[in-house]
Amino acid sequence: MSSDHYFSASPASADERRSVTVELNGARHQVQTAPGIFSPAGLDKGTAILLEYVPNPRGRILDIGCGWGPIMLTAALQSPESEVFGVDVNERSIELAKLNAHSLGLKNVSVGTPDSIDPQLQFDTIWSNPPIRVGKEALHELLLLWLPRLAPGGEAWMVVQKNLGSDSLQKWMGTVLPKDWKITREATSNAFRVLKIARPV
């Protein structure tokens, strides 16, 4: 595995920051990105599709694999009264996500590694464009770490490309999560599936 994958803890490429303009929550913002992270050129197609279909988040919110922060930042902009957490294993992504939250004046955001999150916390909303290319086993381990931490009545929303296994992932979640949880395909757009996981109250 190359040390420059976006799911590596310490990218080997030079940390050459650049400013890009992206649309988040209906407004244009300048954010900082760099090589060695996911989608350094700006907002990727999958994340844009997810943000188009998800309802406004509520309560305590988690972004799994936050990268430079587009999902986390949008959640914080839409729900300023909520606590928003972004987690990633990539140190550069974490630093950039913190920087971007600060530059947007967001006071309700915390960013760190998965180990930095209180293991007792539950989340009312989870949004994610999960790191599919990390491999099936690691992806399953990641989802089994976070999805069971949905609070009663909580919802998780994910976007996954069809050709990268969205349908098989949906079936797998149906076998490992409690039987009364609902896993549904909410939308299909440009070969991406938007999946919803709902925990009953």
Image: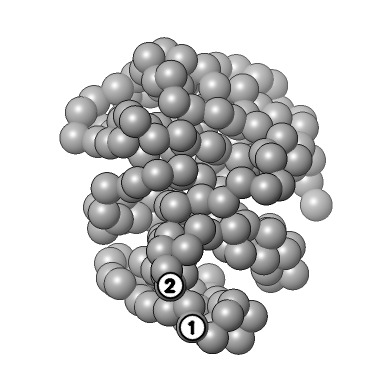
- Secondary structure at numbered mark 1: loop
Q: Is residue 78 above or below residue 124?
A: above
Instruction: Confirm or deny contact between disc 1 and disc 2 (CB under 8 A).
Output: yes
- Counting other residues with Cα less than 10 Å from the Cα at mark 2, is it few (<14), some (14-19), or many (20 or more)? few
Judge left or right: residue 25 versus residue 165. Answer: left
- Measure the C-alpha gap from mark 1 to mark 2: 7 Å
- Secondary structure at numbered mark 2: loop
Residue at image position (53%, 59%) is 150
**In the image shown, does 174 or 15 lie closer to the viewer?**
174
Residue 77 image position (x, y, % from top left) = 31, 30
Q: Is residue 120 above or below residue 154?
A: above
Judge left or right: residue 10 versus residue 43. Answer: right
Judge left or right: residue 162 versus residue 135. Answer: left
Tag 2 residue: 200
Query: In the picture, residue 188 is in which quadrant?
Result: bottom left
Q: How is the image coloured?
A: one colour
- Counting other residues with Cα less than 10 Å from the Cα at mark 1, is it few (<14), some (14-19), or many (20 or more)? few
Judge left or right: residue 5 versus residue 128. Answer: right
Residue 30 image position (x, y, % from top left) = 34, 19
Residue 56 image position (x, y, % from top left) = 27, 48
**In the image shown, does 145 or 2 lie closer to the viewer?**
145
Tag 1 residue: 180
Residue at image position (43%, 52%) is 125
Query: In the picture, residue 184 is in which quadrant?
Result: bottom left
Residue at image position (35%, 76%) is 185
Answer whether residue 129 is visible to the viewer in this image: no
Q: Which mark is residue 84?
A: none
Q: Amino acid at mark 1?
A: Asp
